[in-house]
Each structure stands twice: as C-alpha cells, then as structure tokens.
Image (tube, rainbow, N blue to C red):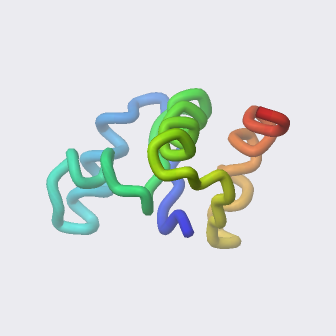
Amino acid sequence: MIQAVVVADQRMIAADQLAARFKVAREVVLETVYVAVGTVEEICETLRQRRERYGVSYFTVFERDMEAFAPVVARLAGT
C-alpha cells in the first residue's frame, strides 16, 4: 500500500514537503516503499526498482491518489 503519491516535476521539492509533513529526513521519503514521488517516469522507475529488489509487482493506492497514479499505471501496463 502506497501511503502517498505525489506526481511533481520537482521531485526533491516534493520530497522535502512530504518529509516536513511526516517529520522525517528527505532520504526517508525517497527510500521508503510507502511513498511514490516525482515525475511519472521517476515513479515508474522507482516501482521497477522495487519490483526487482523486493519482488513486489502489485501496488495499491488510496482513492484520493487514484487520479494522480493513473498515468503511472498506464505507463507501466504490460511491463
């Protein structure tokens, strides 16, 4: 379950904002499996890396994040 999806052109700025919200370091936001942040392509690459590293290929998001996550699903479909 991905707890937060933030599609943004400025990945580091978005990560900093999430880090402040969760009161953790930026690195924690970028490394945790519970967050997807960045451009659509950056998020796709992150999910591909997680698939390779952890063997996870099924991701769930909250309804509030479905619209933001839809382009990621479209890009990853069939890969």
Residue 52: percent from left, percent from top = 52, 39
Asked if 11 appears above or below 15 in the picture, the reply is above
Residue 36 relative to residue 19: left or right? right
Depth check: 56 or 68 in front? 56
Residue located 54% across and 31% down the image: 45
In the image, residue 71 sits, relative to residue 6, either above or below, namely above
**Residue 12, horizontal then vertical, whole percent:** 30, 35
Which quadrant holds residue 13?
top left
- Which quadrant of the rendered structure holds the N terminus? bottom right
Q: How many circles with numbers are drawn on the protein?
A: 0
Residue 77 is drawn in which quadrant?
top right
Give the camera-side residue of 62 and 77. Answer: 77
Q: Is residue 76 left or right of residue 64?
A: right
Q: Residue at x 15, y 53 (%)?
A: 25
In the rendered structure, the answer to whether residue 61 lies left or right of residue 39 reads right
Residue at image coords 40%, 30% = 10
Residue drawn 53% across the image and 63% down it: 2
- Residue 45, placed above or below residue 4: above
Q: Which part of the image, by quadrant, shows the C terminus? A: top right
Horizontal side, residue 72 vs residue 33: left or right:
right
In the rendered view, would you say 23 is above or below 36? below
Image spot of residue 16 (x, y percent) = 25, 47
The answer to which of 18 and 36 lies nearer the viewer is: 36
Give the x, y percent position of residue 64. 65, 69
